[in-house]
Image (spheres, helix red, strand yellow):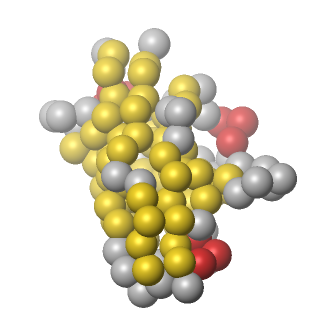
Amino acid sequence: QLRLVESGGGLVQAGGSLRLSCAASGRFFRTYGMGWFRRTPGQEREFVASISRSGGGTYYADSVKGRFTISRDNDNSTVDLQMNSLQSEDTAVYYCAAGPASSNLVRHYTYWGQGTQVTVSS
């Protein structure tokens, strides 16, 4: 069992930056692949970024590549998402997720946080 809690969301102007953090409580955090997803009203959850169990492998959606960076700290059971050059299209609720391996698919993740709102004003 893994409990995930996101933080760091908020309101930012276009071109600005935010850093999201996901804190995990439970055992064996380092055995989970981690991902960030986002959802806008009326849409399905969309893949943003993922990171392997060791942190050595990362994968990004094309829409955020070069602007977002995912990282993890296995000693402190956290995974972060640094978001730079934010655009209005990045406005969404952002979710942290954990699964057996890192993936870009929602169905591959077992545990989910409650989400944190990111709003980018243009």
Can the viewer see residue 77? yes
Task: Name the one closer to the observer, 121 or 15.
Answer: 121
Q: How many marks?
A: 0
Task: Name the one closer to the observer, 101 or 50.
Answer: 50
Task: Name the one closer to the observer, 111 or 83.
Answer: 83
Q: Residue at x 34, y 52 (%)?
A: 8
43 relative to 69 in the view: left or right: right
54 relative to 35 in the view: left or right: left
In this rendering, the answer to whether 74 lies above or below 61 is above
Name the residue furthest right: 42
Q: Residue at x 16, y 34 (%)?
A: 75
Screen quadrant of the C terminus: bottom right
In this rendering, the answer to whether 37 lies above or below 62 is above
Screen quadrant of the N terminus: top left
Task: Name the one closer to the observer, 119 or 96.
Answer: 119
In this rendering, the answer to whether 70 lies above or below 3 is below
Q: Residue at x 71, y 49 (%)?
A: 45
Q: Residue at x 42, y 21 (%)?
A: 3
Where on the picture, by quarter, is residue 83?
bottom left
114 relative to 68 in the view: left or right: right
Q: Position of residue 43 (x, y in %)?
A: 80, 55
110 relative to 76 in the view: left or right: right
Can the viewer see residue 64? no
Where on the picture, by quarter, is residue 88?
bottom right
Q: Position of residue 81 (x, y in %)?
A: 38, 58
